Amino acid sequence: MRAVAQSLGQTARLQRRSSLGPIKTLVFAMVGLLGLSLVVNAQARKDSPGARGRADNTENTLLVWAGDAAHAKPDFIAVIDFDRDSPSYGKVLRTVPLSGASAIGNEPHHVGISRDGRTLALGGLLSVLRGQDQVFFFDVTDPRHPTFLRSNNPPQATITDEFAALSNGGFLVTFMGGPNGAHPGRVVEYDADLNAVKAWPTDLPNDGFNPHGLSVDEAHNLMVTSDFICPAHTLNVPGGGGVNLRGSIRVWNLARRSITRTIIVGDPAHPAGTMDVQLIPHDQRLRAFTAGMGDGNLYLVDTQKGTAKAVFNFGVLAVQNVPAMPQLLRMNKEGTRLFTTVIGAGKVVMLDIASPEHPKLLSVVDLGPNSGPHFLSLTGDQKRLVVSDYFLVEDLAPGGVVNADGDHRVHVINVHGNRLELDAKFDLNFNRDISTGPARPHGVIALPLKRGQ
């Protein structure tokens, strides 16, 4: 626990025949060559990555939810060219700032996208410190021109974290804190019209319910959340000023929105700090992975048997006596690869999880000194990871003990089978590239330029 507290303080050919005379034959030949040129050029345009993105939904626009480092300018969405073939690949095309009373000092955090890809949901981790709205919704039907829809401040919940899109067009959202920023937290439901429906569960646990991670399987009526940390305890308030980690997974009956089981992860005397939890795609046993930021372990969670077993330790990646602290988890659609960011070590990792009981380390990308990789997103074609290099600095009044900064870059990492490779062409630095001044990037999502076309 002390090591964690200290560390927090610091991706045809054409042919024509003619029986006409020589002149007419020459004319037709020229027309034929012109037609051939047009067909070849058209095919070349069709085969370019940018054109493929517009035709088959390859993501070529990146949206980054970010905050002004000085908390003096509005928080914003940065619109980035994500088309590999574009001369402006990796460049900021525009920023879309928030406006109104809740525009500044939200500490932009996680993002979510609706099932139809048209609504972007954004969370403000520390909006509560200024008494402002905590969730912001944008229409991203045209992702290069996000349009603000509405914002919301659920009265029973604070400290916005993860989003899960539902088939009905709505969202479930974890909030680590209740009204006072401490436990018990809540999971808030939004409908397809983006109205807050209700805060769940109705029967609140009293044993450190601070939900951060969230994963939903509607087909099996299953939801899991992970308790991470008591957020109010990290702030410089009476009774605060420390790190009070949690270590548990909650298993839910999704239809009833009720918790059916609590699974203790790791040593209860030294809570693991279970930041994230993700159900394994296509796993017949309905298992999940979680990771302990405090103990550095990857755990295989059996949601049906109620067990959590350590199956890998990230300590092999530690550097200079700084603990390797796994952050968020992402898996491929087949459930055979797991990706995670490791703060402290400054690394991005890919594991082979084809045998969930025995993960194998496949590839590591080292982002270097002063890096702090946290949020990551895998593109739809599963060929690129996007990683934001910033976790959290609690410098909004009253301040707090968490000072886990990064270099404020957004990285793209190419996924080549069993190997990760940093994309050197993508050079995006939020300390340098934002017109309003240095900023902190957090949630990222890649979208196609023209969805459905």
Image (cartoon, rainbow, N blue to C red):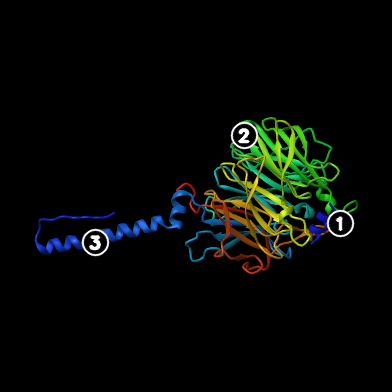
Q: Amino acid at mark 3?
A: Leu
Could you tell me which secondary element the residue under label 3 belongs to? helix
Q: Amino acid at mark 1?
A: Asn
Can you give x and y, in whole percent of width and height, for residue 333 in the image? 56, 43
The picture quadrant where one finds residue 34 is bottom left
Task: Give the class, few, some or many, for how many residues have Cα within 10 Å of label 3's Cα (few <14, many ≥20).
Answer: some
Q: Who's the residue at 78% across and 49% down the image?
A: 295
Tag on residue 20?
Answer: none
Task: Give the class, few, some or many, for how many residues have Cα within 10 Å of label 2's Cα (few <14, many ≥20).
Answer: few
Identify whether 263 is placed above or below 87: above
Q: Which of marks 3 and 1 precedes in the sequence?
A: 3
23 or 425: nearer the viewer: 425
Q: Amino acid at mark 2?
A: Glu
Mark 1 and mark 2: Cα distance apart in space: 40 Å
The residue at which mark 1 appears reads as 236
Mark 3 and mark 2: Cα distance apart in space: 56 Å
CB of mark 1 within 8 Å of CB of mark 3? no
432 or 287: nearer the viewer: 287
The residue at which mark 2 appears reads as 218
Q: Nearer the viewer, mark 1 or mark 3?
A: 3
376 or 80: nearer the viewer: 376
Mark 1 and mark 3: Cα distance apart in space: 75 Å
CB of mark 3 within 8 Å of CB of mark 2? no
The residue at which mark 3 appears reads as 33
Can you give x and y, in whole percent of width and height, for residue 48 in the image? 42, 58
Farthest right residue in view = 238
